[in-house]
Image: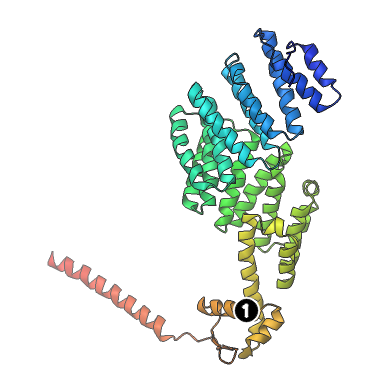
Amino acid sequence: MASSHLAATTESLALAMEAKNPSEAISILYRVLEDPSSSSEALRMKEQAITNLTDLLRQENRGEDLRSLLTQLRPFFSLIPKAKTAKIVRGIIDAVAKIPGTSALQIALCKEMVQWTRAEKRTFLRQRVEARLAALLMENKEFSEALTLLSSLVKEVRRLDDKLLLVDIDLLESKLHFSLRNLPKAKAALTAARTAANAIYVPPAQQGAIDLQSGILHAEEKDYKTAYSYFFEAFESFNALEDPKAVFSLKYMLLCKIMVNQADDVGGIISSKAGLQYVGPDLDAMKAVADAHSKRSLKLFEITLRDYKVQLEEDPIVHRHLQSLYDTLLEQNLCRLIEPFSRVEIAHIAELIELPIDHVERKLSQMILDKKFAGTLDQGAGCLIIFDDPKTDAIYPATLETISNIGKVVDSLYVRSAKIMT
């Protein structure tokens, strides 16, 4: 950084734009920020210089320099309105977030800003930075710390009745409880977010996030038709904004189609005008899953899971539902294979289904316990013995019906005797 400052004027900003390389432009902009003038025009030029400098540092992936810039600007923040300070702070934090691999840096930066805003008593800005910090902690899987932070923050924001921020916090709380597998609390927090959102205008991106979370929670309850509707609404919102989250909404829409045995619709959705914009590994993965499901092929299913591990296995929402789909598919295949037999070697079934013997044996045992079919495992002989479907003895329903009729007669006699006594 040069020691001499430059006047905060339009000419200085133009000089930075005409610089030969980003480093030279960054140096010029730093010198503009050193201008001691505090006139309204100089402050306006410095604000523009900060915006330009933030963009350049982000393009150069200089996250630590952005962090230092935020510290360096603290005296400048006392000269401008609090709303502009909040805009600059959030802009710099957003710029750091766009630099890959800066998760730890973002958390540290937010914690520093929370301390500074507390000292400066800038409540409005602190609450938003704390909400951002809670989101970063959740992404970093520091769930208990994030939940503690949100618990105190949500009480404070409810007292101030800042509904827009409250929607963000309630939505974040829902995601956090869902990550901790606490579905009742996740649904309660989402309901609170919807209630707050109904009272104000909610930006399309935020409404899309609410719909996406609603779809995820309905899918978790196996209500895939309702989940599909919410994912579609989320996709419409994100697609209009050209938000990268649109591809995830579309991916979950396809997942819902597969889970309700409508895998044939997947190809049509992908080849639609909206779907073609997002053709890539994520949609290819769902298409492969749909093909495996249509063909009832476990081997094809496993190949798909292996080939698209990042898109399927590493997406916790997709992975959870595909695990359920895999179990269902395995059960259907096993039932179809054992149907012609009364006694069959487990090794033969494993060979037919192309899976390890111990895996097949474990699954057959589970199916017997779940009463998916009547049978037993002879582990000494390595065989599965299938029983004939037991016929229900007609005496039990007849006995229950007789007892029920006797109960009605006794009740009727009791009513009559009560009338006689009166």
Q: Residues within 10 Å of mark 1 (few under 14, many from 20)?
A: many
Above or below, 99 relative to 43: below
- Tally the numbered discs: 1
Of residues 226 and 331, the one drawn nearer to the viewer in this rendering: 331
Please provide percent x and percent y for residue 74. Answer: 59, 21
Q: Amino acid at mark 1?
A: Val
Q: Is residue 422 left or right of residue 144?
A: left
* Colouring convention used in this rendered image of the protein: rainbow
Asked whether the viewer can see residue 374, the reply is yes
Please identify the quarter of the rendering in which residue 224 is found: bottom right
Rendered residue at 63%/33% (across/down): 203
Of residues 200 and 248, the one drawn nearer to the viewer in this rendering: 248
Please provide percent x and percent y for residue 214. Answer: 57, 47
Rendered residue at 70%/83% (across/down): 351
Q: Which residue appears farthest toward the left when viewing the image?
A: 421
Of residues 333 and 6, the one drawn nearer to the viewer in this rendering: 6
- Mark 1, secondary structure of its residue: helix
Above or below, 203 relative to 366: above
Please provide percent x and percent y for residue 177. Answer: 51, 48
Q: Is residue 324 left or right of residue 55?
A: left
Please provide percent x and percent y for residue 285. Answer: 74, 58
Asked whether the viewer can see residue 87, the reply is no
Residue wearing tag 1: 360
Q: Is residue 135 left or right of residue 9?
A: left
Say which quadrant the C terminus sits in: bottom left
Rendered residue at 71%/60% (across/down): 309
Say which quadrant the N terminus sits in: top right
Above or below, 133 relative to 81: below
